[in-house]
Amino acid sequence: MSSPEESLPTRVQRKNVDVFDRDAACNEGYLYTKSVRLSCRLATQRSTDAILATGCLLGRSIVDLGCGDGFYTIRFCDFGHPKSIVGVDPAGQAIAVANANKENRPLQFLIGDAHHLPFPSKAFCTMTTIRRILFVKHFALRPKLSSTSRMEIMRV
């Protein structure tokens, strides 16, 4: 698990997070990011390529909401050349995997809840989220994320 200094308070119901924690713990990351199956490799590569092709990460401060095991966040750091990048996810086991996999990269992974981000206004230029917006329980939050979350949402 992340140390307390690296953790953000989370109010997410545990039942919604436990399945992700189990996946990360059992597979040392999420199964779809660790799998050698062609379909998983193609899907993750295409998603990564689509975000990187926009060029919107270069030199910017990024928050990756729902970063999970850090698979995409690490690739964004390696190939998107952001100024800074922070990954946030409520699944502590996934964050532990992300922190183990980041090696000496200049990025940070925190346990947290997208509904309650403790960052100051304009702390980030861009927010990324890969498939995670599908998990937003309340549709009312979706417009809130794009209009008041202190950053732009990259739409790919």
Image (spheres, rainbow, N blue to C red):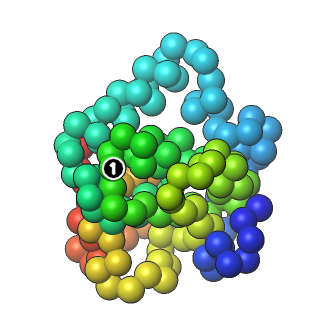
- Which residue is rendered at x = 63% and y = 79% of the image? 9
Residue 69 location in percent, x, y? 61, 47
Viewer-nearest residue: 120 or 78: 78
Instruction: Please state which of residues 76 and 149 is positioned toward the viewer in this rendering.
Output: 76
Camera-nearest residue between 126 and 108: 108
- Farthest-out residue, bottom: 120
Q: Is residue 39 above or below residue 148?
A: above
- Give amino acid for label 1: His
Q: Which residue position is annotated with label 1?
A: 81
Image quadrant holding the N terminus, namely bottom right
**In the image, is residue 36 above or below residue 19?**
above
Question: Residue 131, can we see it?
Answer: no
Q: Residue at x 33, y 55 (%)?
A: 82
Q: Quadrant of the C terminus?
A: top left
Q: Nearer the viewer, residue 156 or 143?
A: 156
Q: Residue furthest right?
A: 26
Q: Is residue 156 left or right of residue 19?
A: left
Label 1: few (<14), some or many (≥20) within 10 Å? some
Residue in the image at 43% along x and 20% along y: 42
Residue 31: x and y in percent read 65, 32
